[in-house]
Amino acid sequence: MRFSTFVVILATACDQDPLRGAGTGSEADGDADGDSDADGVPGSCAPPPTPAGADVVLAAPFDALYRAYDLGPVPGVPNPLGGTVVPTDDPDTLLVAGGSESESGAIHRIGVIRDACGHIVGFDGQAAAVASTPYVDANLVYVASDLMLYTEWPQYYLSQLAGYANAPSLRTDLRALGMPSSDDQGPGGLGLVPASLPSARELRLVTWPGGRWYHVDSVLDGGLASIDGLSQTATLPNEPGGFAYVPAGSPGFERQSVIVAEWRRQDPSADRVAVYEVDDAGDPRLDTRREFFARFPRPWGAYFEPVTGDYLFLSWGTGEDHVYIVQGFEPPEELF
């Protein structure tokens, strides 16, 4: 199939980029270091009000190092939920993909409430749609301060939102770059290799359900990313979805690792969240797989927020999807 793109230019009289917004949710600026109590679990500030329920189970040894909480559904964001990200210039705002994997998919903006330690403990107000992004999926990824990338599933597209865009600025058909469609359904997870690795800031992508792990050849060009090629380097098991690189130095992770959702079509009881050590290219080493969550309700979106390193995980397809947050990680490295 031929390479297909289109460009949408948005003219607006707004004073502020709606994708970055103006959250008002911080209760205090405070110390965002995520201070820990005696057993190594964050405890210097009161935790979010709702611990994760019995359907969310951290696997050993992580159950002794981390705590999971349920932030609930995102007010105003339609199910199912996709990826999420904190805008590069507004830590009190969260962007959340709603209507994921459907024609009505859109990115919504909502304020967040942070405690005195910087941890997100709730949502502030009602979400507002800021960009129409049909088929948006598991990860929202900034590759520059004013350029976000996301996948379209099951459309086989990698799409971009630049600046004030309220619709895709550029869409790249990955089939035109060699992604097969005969025995798979399209790209789901997307991420940037962390700064500590030799392949820092390179794009990685995984398909669902086939688990094909790709390097994405790209270069920033005139405010957008030129997507020039794909190369498959691994095949992940268990129908992987959203993924994120674990912040270096986090408890229980001696080597750079990646955390991956496993969303199983035939048996939701087999859903897991796994972690892998990665090589210098940021590729998972399959023989290092461990479970992080031994049980999780339909895991999909994955993200480490930049202020505290807390891990946001979103469910997909539960009827009322929730955002969960895990405290105990180190803050991630800055990529730009």
Image (cartoon, rainbow, N blue to C red):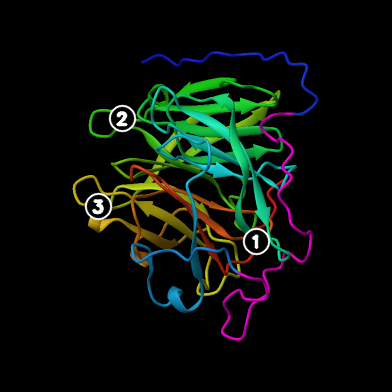
Helix, strand or loop at mark 1 = loop
Q: Is residue 3 above or below residue 108?
A: above
User: Going 41% across and 37% down the picture, which residue do you hit?
Assistant: 79
| Residue topped by disc 2 | 180
- Measured as percent of width and height from the top left, residue 174 is found at 42, 27
Instruction: Magenta stretch: give its range.
Output: 17-46
| Residue topped by disc 1 | 119
Is residue 202 visible to us here?
no
| Residue topped by disc 3 | 268
Cα separation between marks 2 and 3: 26 Å
Residues at marks 2 and 3 touching, judged by CB atoms closer than 8 Å: no
Q: Pick whichever of labels 3 and 1 is earlier in the sequence.
A: 1
Helix, strand or loop at mark 2 = loop
- Measured as percent of width and height from the top left, residue 249 is found at 60, 70
| In front of the other: 18 or 203 | 18
Which numbered disc, 1 or 2, marks the residue closer to the eye? 1
Q: Residue furthest left?
A: 266
User: Going 61% across and 22% down the picture, which residue do you hit?
Assistant: 166
Cα separation between marks 3 and 1: 30 Å
Cα separation between marks 1 and 2: 41 Å
Mark 2 closeness class: few <14, some 14–19, many ≥20 residues within 10 Å: some
| In front of the other: 161 or 281 | 161
- Corner quadrant of residue 18: top right
Query: How many marks are shown on the rendered structure?
Result: 3
- Measured as percent of width and height from the top left, residue 110 is found at 62, 40
Amino acid bearing label 3? Pro
